Image (cartoon, rainbow, N blue to C red):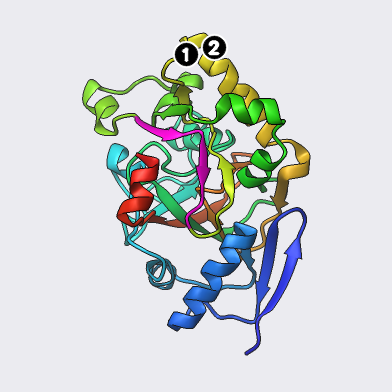
Amino acid sequence: MTWTITPQHPFSARVEGIDLRTPLTPAEVQRIETLMDTHAVLVFPGQQLDQHQQINYAKHFGPLDLGLRKLKGGPHRFDYAELADISNVKADGQVAEREHGKIVGNVANQLWHSDSSFQRPRAKYSMLHAVVTPAFGGDTEFADLRLAWDHLPDWQQRQVQGLRAVHYALHSRFLLGDTAYTDEQKNTLQAVEWPLVQTDPRSGRKALYVGVHTCEIPGMTLAEGRMLLMDLLEHATQREFVYRHRWAVGDLVMWDNTATVHRGRWYDLSERRELRRATTEEVLTSPEAAALA
């Protein structure tokens, strides 16, 4: 079957004519990776995937990432620990009460972030599949960090070139007042540093690597560094750089976490919403890894 590729403003694309339940050929994997280099977000509509099929699709693109499952543990609704439960549903299948930890996760997902930017190796591709959607709301927005760099004024490009940012897994949770973590949990995922300006080894494009997991800039005072990070994230997420996805059951959306940030949007948290996410770790050659060290 012939694929139909439909670009969507300002950077994503819709891909039709492919059934993700079946194994991909090496040529198909390469084609998807090439499309990702260009668009950074791909929408595959009408994909009726079960858990096993979603995991198998993700494995085409690298080793799977556990993300915050390393920190949280506890009951899990899925057969695979590598599937993130992006929902307001508890392990017993019931919609979570407002005070439940699942709701904190839903609210935290409304902050602009890249998945697993707080670890090494970080996340590369995320693949989110819609199983149950609410009657209203629950969209996901994506912002292109490459466009953010391209449109940064020359003086600010010079300002941030060479700077690094600290990414910490619980920084966003602390912002929301979610502080009930043991010292062991706080230290499970140690903070990591990444360059603020990065060059993608595949596409050669530069990206402004910011997001809510960033908490300080080494060499700057805490206040000044955080203010700069907030300004850069505000610049990166202006409307011109944002694609907003309105979910339909069966959609699988795949994005590049090293080239984009994303956030969920409001929905009635008493209404059931279920999505499953598989995520791959970034795999780099030694020279590429050294450039980000």
Position of residue 230 relative to residue 283, above or below, is above
In the image, 56 versus 107, the foreground residue is 56
* Image: magenta residue range: 192-201
Give residue 254's mark: none
Q: Would you name the residue on which mark 1 appears? A: 220
Task: Name the chief secondary structure element in magenta.
Answer: strand
Residue with the most extreme bottom position = 1
- Classify the position of the C terminus by image quarter: top left
Q: Amino acid at mark 2?
A: Glu
Residue 219, located in which quarter of the rendered image? top left
* In contact (CB < 8 Å): disc 2 and disc 1: yes
Q: Judge by depth and name the residue closer to the eye, 189 or 275.
A: 189
Of all residues, the one furthest to the left in this rendering is 184
Locate residue 21, reporting x and y percent: 48, 78
Q: Is residue 267 visible?
A: no
Secondary element at tag 2:
helix
Identify the residue at image location x=51%, y=47%: 199
Q: CA distance from mark 2 to mark 1?
A: 6 Å
What percent of the width, then of the height, locates residue 27?
A: 48, 82
Residue at 46 percent of width and 44 percent of height: 115
Mark 2 neighbour class, 10 Å CA radius: few under 14, some 14 to 19, many 20 or more: few
**Can residue 5 be found in the magenta stretch?**
no
Would you place residue 106 above or below residue 61 in this image? above
Residue annotated with mark 2: 224
Whether residue 96 is situated above or below residue 229 in the rendered picture: below
Q: Residue 236 vs residue 257: left or right?
A: right
Residue depicted at 56% across the width and 27% down the height? 160
Position of 57 compared to 248: left or right? left
What count of labels does the image hold?
A: 2
Q: Is residue 199 magenta?
A: yes
Residue 223 location in percent, x, y? 52, 10
Across and down, in percent, residue 142 comes to 64, 47
